[in-house]
Image (spheres, rainbow, N blue to C red):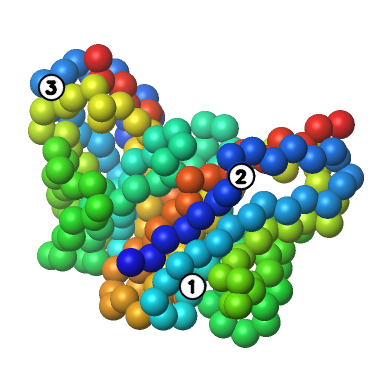
């Protein structure tokens, strides 16, 4: 987990506020991902990036945006937070290749009141 | 579209007994299958994967999984459970036909509880 770090680890914010979650990795991987985890729903993909110039929407991208500032950094933004975005957010990285596993950060617990 | 099903929300096992956590999948092409474990307040940790070859895959912490193509299953197993194995387990699949992205589809997770 230390190879993939996320900040902040916990955040409480109010409805309508803009918030940014940050992810950094030292694994040298090109591919980075943002997921959210909700109880009983597993992990769902929000956005993913193949490299700095390649960003793609996942299955639940509405209400979110991302920025790939460098190979090692991938940020997730909630432009105007709403309560149903309360969740656990994970960043992950991987090497290219169909069979390569993903490595996850420790997660950010976000609460929107 | 690819999908994963973990039919049990929770599995309870006595320490020392064998454990099985079930997973079935649906893909169009050849499946790439993964198991991850999540301990409280931690991120997901990779346990093992099946890409090709031997249907029995061995992974970390004494876990193994058996790929069964005819039953489209990839059940996680351990011969002798430990209390420290108590955690949330996720199965994930990637369809070998889809190009690029290495996108995984995760199951909803199975909570494993190992009791003394």
Q: Quadrant of residue B98?
A: bottom left
Q: Quadrant of residue B13?
A: top right
Q: Quadrant of the C terminus of chain A?
A: top left
Count residues near mark 1 (Cα–Cα under 10 Å), then give few for <14, some for 14-19, many for 20+: many
Count residues near mark 2 (Cα–Cα under 10 Å), then give few for <14, some for 14-19, many for 20+: some
Give me the residue at 11% from left, 21% from top: A16
Give me the residue at 29% from left, 68% from top: B101
Q: Nearer the viewer, residue A39 or B59?
A: A39
Name the chain letter of the residue that bears numbered label 3: A
Label 3 in the same subunit as label 1: no
Give the residue pinned by disc 3.
A17
Label 3–label 1 contact, CB within 8 A: no
Secondary element type, mark 1: strand
Depth-wise, is mark 2 or mark 3 nearer the camera? 2
Left or right, B89 with respect to B92, comes to right
Marks 2 and 1 sit apart, C-alpha to C-alpha, by 21 Å
Question: What label sits on residue B32 in the rendered view?
Answer: 1
Instruction: Estimate the x, y position of residue A5 in percent, counting from the top left.
Output: 39, 43
Name the chain letter of the residue that bears numbered label 1: B
Question: What label sits on residue B8 in the rendered view?
Answer: 2
Depth-wise, is mark 3 or mark 1 nearer the camera? 1
Left or right, A24 with respect to A76, comes to right
Instruction: Estimate the x, y position of residue A27 in percent, counting from the top left.
Output: 41, 60
Marks 3 and 1 sit apart, C-alpha to C-alpha, by 39 Å
């Amino acid at each position: 987990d230390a190879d993939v770090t996320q900040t902040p680890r916990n955040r409480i914010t109010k409805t309508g506020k803009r918030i940014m979650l940050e992810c950094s990795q030292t694994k040298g991987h090109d591919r980075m991902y943002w997921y959210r985890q909700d109880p009983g729903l597993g992990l769902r993909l929000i956005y993913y990036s193949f490299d700095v110039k390649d960003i793609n929407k996942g299955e639940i991208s509405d209400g979110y945006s991302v920025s790939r500032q460098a190979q090692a950094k991938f940020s997730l933004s909630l432009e105007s937070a709403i309560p149903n975005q309360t969740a656990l957010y994970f960043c992950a990285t991987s090497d290219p290749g169909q069979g390569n596993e993903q490595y996850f950060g420790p997660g950010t617990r976000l609460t929107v009141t | 579209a690819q999908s994963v099903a973990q039919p049990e929300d929770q599995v309870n096992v006595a320490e020392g007994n064998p454990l099985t956590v079930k997973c079935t999948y649906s893909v169009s092409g050849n499946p790439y299958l993964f198991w991850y474990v999540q301990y409280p307040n931690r991120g997901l940790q990779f346990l093992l994967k099946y890409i090709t070859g031997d249907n029995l895959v061995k992974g970390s912490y004494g876990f193994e999984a058996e790929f069964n193509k005819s039953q489209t299953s990839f059940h996680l197993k351990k011969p002798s459970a430990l209390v420290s194995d108590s955690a949330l387990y996720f199965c994930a699949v990637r369809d070998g036909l889809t190009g690029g992205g290495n996108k995984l589809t995760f199951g909803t997770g199975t909570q494993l509880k190992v009791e003394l």
